[in-house]
Image (tube, grey):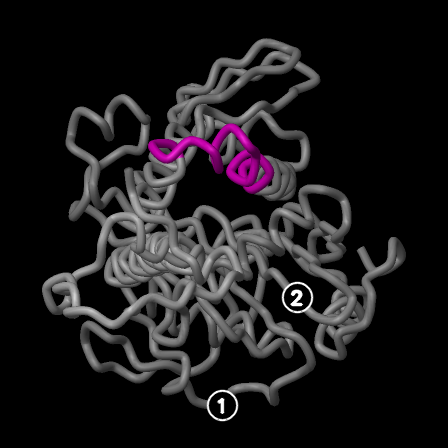
Amino acid sequence: MHPVSLHSTGLAPAQSPPGPAAPGPPRGSRRRSERVPRPRRSRVRRVLRALSLLVLLAVLGGVGTYVWADSRLAGDVDLAALPDRPAPGKGTNYLIVGSDSREGLSEQQARKLHTGSSAGAEGRRTDSMMVLHTGAHGASLTSLPRDSWVTIPAYVDPATGVHHKPEKNKLNAAFSLGGPELLVRTVESNTGLRIGHYTEIGFAGFVGIVDAVGGVRMCVDRHIVDDKSGLDLTEGCHTLDGREALGFVRQRHQEKAGDLGRSRNQQKFLSALAEKAASRDVLLDPSALFGTAGAGLDTLIVDKSTGIPQLTRLFEALRKVSSGSGTQQGVPVATIGYPTSKGSAVLWDRQKSAHLFARLRADRPVTVGDR
């Protein structure tokens, strides 16, 4: 039977005659019955340490993902080196460009997607251009028809070094003549908007993103058959895969408004794509989420000041536009099929377009009358 600790009873020990001292327990040890229970705080500390480790792993995982994504961005465009730029306005302007670059496509894929020649056979050209403005009054997405009749500022041909004077031409010609830098300068000089960030994606990246999110649902009000883009959509709603989506945003010969109709389709599809990419189906599916990010980053070209934070803000703004909390419009147009020395073009309405760009420059809300 184990002895009872008198101290625990609160009684004083009885007096007994002195005798030889009983040998005590070995130094540094306690009897089992006298062992002090471990404080409960130690268990709390263990739980806190475990939680701290999990948080650390999450942070390291986030940092690793950030580094992975940031390292795949091609920051090839130096906006800071551009000459004769307009003064910065209020808010931020992103120039979003869809190019016909075949980089990343095999000959077989190029034939399947009806893109024409494969990578390297032709220089890059623009299939779509939009300015996304973000500021105190939300987001506003403005399409710039690629056939817009504009003034291309003076430039030096990057291939030959030959100086060229300012000249009238179609907007997409600026891209083919002087790349992203001349395109940004042309947009800035004709709109008065200071472009803060540049993003460009080619065919392969576009198709990859659409397929990674599981397709994008679009509705059409008629049967669309376009041999050049390979598109064949019956009237009604469809979930477009990457190949079909590329055909949808590229086709214009079946649109009554031609290039303007294509611009509206591109704007509509981009908003729907942003909404799908932000859906629970994608965000809660790691394979879809990383597949989407990887597909986009592999062929995305940005300016040197654009990183993951800027792309995140761009994506969030597009999502807001798609949800109806932002505005979508095209540049006000005076004439479609305007005859020029470079072929049929789109002529902007000078007064209305100047009013629209002035409101964007001042970060004022865009109303129906501005569109």
Give the residue type at disc 2. Thr
Residue 134 is marked as 2
Give the residue type at disc 1. Asp
Magenta residue check for 274: yes
Instruction: Work out which residue is located at the far top of the displayed protein and give it.
Output: 234
Residue behind mark 1? 84
Nearer the observer: mark 2 or 1; the answer is 2
Q: CA distance from mark 2 to mark 1?
A: 23 Å
Q: Nearer the viewer, residue 369 or 300?
A: 300
The image shows residue 222, relative to residue 106, as above or below, that is: above
Precedes in sequence: disc 2 or disc 1: 1
Label 2: state its secondary structure. strand
Disc 2 residue crowd, few under 14, some 14–19, many 20+, Cα 10 Å: many
Q: Nearer the viewer, residue 1 or 262?
A: 1
Q: Is residue 365 left or right of residue 116?
A: right
Looking at the rendered image, the quarter that the C terminus falls into is bottom right
Q: Residue at x 34, y 78 (%)?
A: 78
Residue 290 drawn at (x, y percent)? 34, 40
Q: Nearer the viewer, residue 262 or 241?
A: 241
Q: Residue at x 60, y 51 (%)?
A: 318
Residue 4 drawn at (x, y percent)? 38, 49
Q: Residue at x 25, y 42 (%)?
A: 102
> Main SS of the magenta segment?
helix
Residue 230 appears in which quarter of the rendering? Answer: top left
Residue 256 drawn at (x, y percent)? 67, 30
Residue 174 drawn at (x, y percent)? 42, 65
The image shows residue 351, relative to residue 38, as above or below, that is: below
Highlighted magenta segment, given as a residue range: 273-288
Label 1: state its secondary structure. loop
Disc 1 residue crowd, few under 14, some 14–19, many 20+, Cα 10 Å: few
Looking at the rendered image, the quarter that the N terminus falls into is top left
Residue 142 appears in which quarter of the rendering? Answer: bottom right
